[in-house]
Image (spheres, helix red, strand yellow):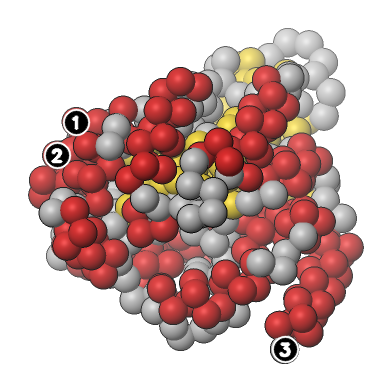
Amino acid sequence: MLIKNTCLVNESFQVERGKYILIENDRISYIGDKHPEGYFGETYNGENKVVLPGFFNNHCHVPMTLLRGYGEGLPLHRWLAEKMFPFEAKLTGEDIYWGSLLGIAEMIKSGVVSFTDMYFEIEMMAQAVSESGIKVNLSHGLSYNSKKPSIFELQGYKDTERLLDIASRDKTGRLKIDIGLHAEYTSRESLVREVAHYARERNLIVHTHLSETQGEHDNCKLKYGKTPAEYFAECGLFDQPTTAAHCVWVEDSDIEIIKSKGVVPVHCPSSNMKLGSGFAPIKQMIEAGIPVTIGTDGASSNNNLNMVEEIYLAAMINKGSTQDPEFMYPAQLLKLATINGARAQDREDCGSIKVGNKADLVIFDMDKPHLQPVFDELANILYSGQSDDICMTMIDGQIVYKDGEFKTIDIEKVMHKAVGIKERILSELV
């Protein structure tokens, strides 16, 4: 496919105009000012369009689209115990499959090409990923079970081992398997150390929640005399690359640990505000040289998986809370949502538009009242843009969404299934 006469955001996150982009198979093979010689199949007119690298949603629980709007108005721990856990206990593998497709559709409509997820029934999630064309770093969130105290007895360990085998045979490279530890407050030290050892043994990225609420953070200090970051570091969890969601209540010493251990924090502004958790010290972390990323969290605490909105909120919240209008300037903001996310997933050939990289592209249509006039294309997109302005999402050279149509997902069937699942489980909970 050849995209002609378009604006693009290059690997330095600067806008270039009047460009041609050639996609062959799953990669970008040419970027230039002139039409390349030869016939390349479909030609796409990029006039009045802007091509961006695809977005990476680095913390999510995608099947929780099935719980969207359930448990409103509760703080995190009541929300989990009273609403989320009882509902999730009723979910079947098939439910997880349909919920995954619903969430994936929402993400690709908002320009997401890859996501990092922690949930259960992850084999059914992997099936949805395979069918939809998106990429994922997938993990089963392990937590302590007093009846099965060892990691090797937990279903999450068995699921991880099975998915590692499946991923090893995946020729596309779209499916990657991480090891998930749900959180400090849902585990015991023995489990944390076992997960750390297993991650080293299997060379896996760790995915966990870290210092999401003040209560979680302070209770860990009461139990162990350490912050969650100090505790995890001492247990060896951070000896492997780690994706740490939220990091709202991290202290100065924690930020030093995060930097020294190469932990990647995931900023989830919508979820942190909606659950009343607070505001993460993103500026402090970025100024320390930490490669922060952005995530939506699940649709039950957001309540959507709209990455365009999440990027916008990350900018507005951090400009306002730091009283610094120069912070989160467009190129810096886009870097968090693209190449930082790709590196956190260990995808070295993704996250930016350059020859040789995977063709993960998002195209914005600038012919909209709220995007005109244009002084700065990137500022217009990131501060004024909406997900409905996206006219194409391409992943590994495959068009998965174009002009309002999902190319790999039967969205009407998916939405019908989601409503049926909700009604069935609510009847079972009565």
Q: In the image, what residue type sits under mark 1?
A: Ser
Could you say where residue 293 lies in the image, as x and y percent from the top left? 38, 44
Residue 430: which disc? 3
Which label number is shown at residue 260? 1
Question: x, y (%) of residue 326?
Answer: 20, 53
Location of residue 21 by image quarter = top right
Sort mark 1 into few (<14), some (14-19) or many (20+) by Cα contacts within 10 Å.
few
Q: For mark 2, what is the residue?
A: 256
Disc 3 element: loop
Measuring 41% from the left and 73% from the top, which residue is drawn there? 77
Q: Label 2: how many residues lie within 10 Å, few (<14), some (14-19) or many (20+)?
A: some
Exactly how many numbered labels are in the figure?
3
| Tag 3 near tag 2, CB within 8 Å | no
For the residues bearing labels 2 and 1, Cβ distance under 8 angstroms: yes
Q: Quadrant of the N terminus?
A: top right
Q: Is residue 151 above or below residue 23?
A: below
- Tell me the residue at 44%/79% (across/down): 78
Which residue is more in the foreground, 396 or 428? 428
* Residue ID at (33%, 45%): 189
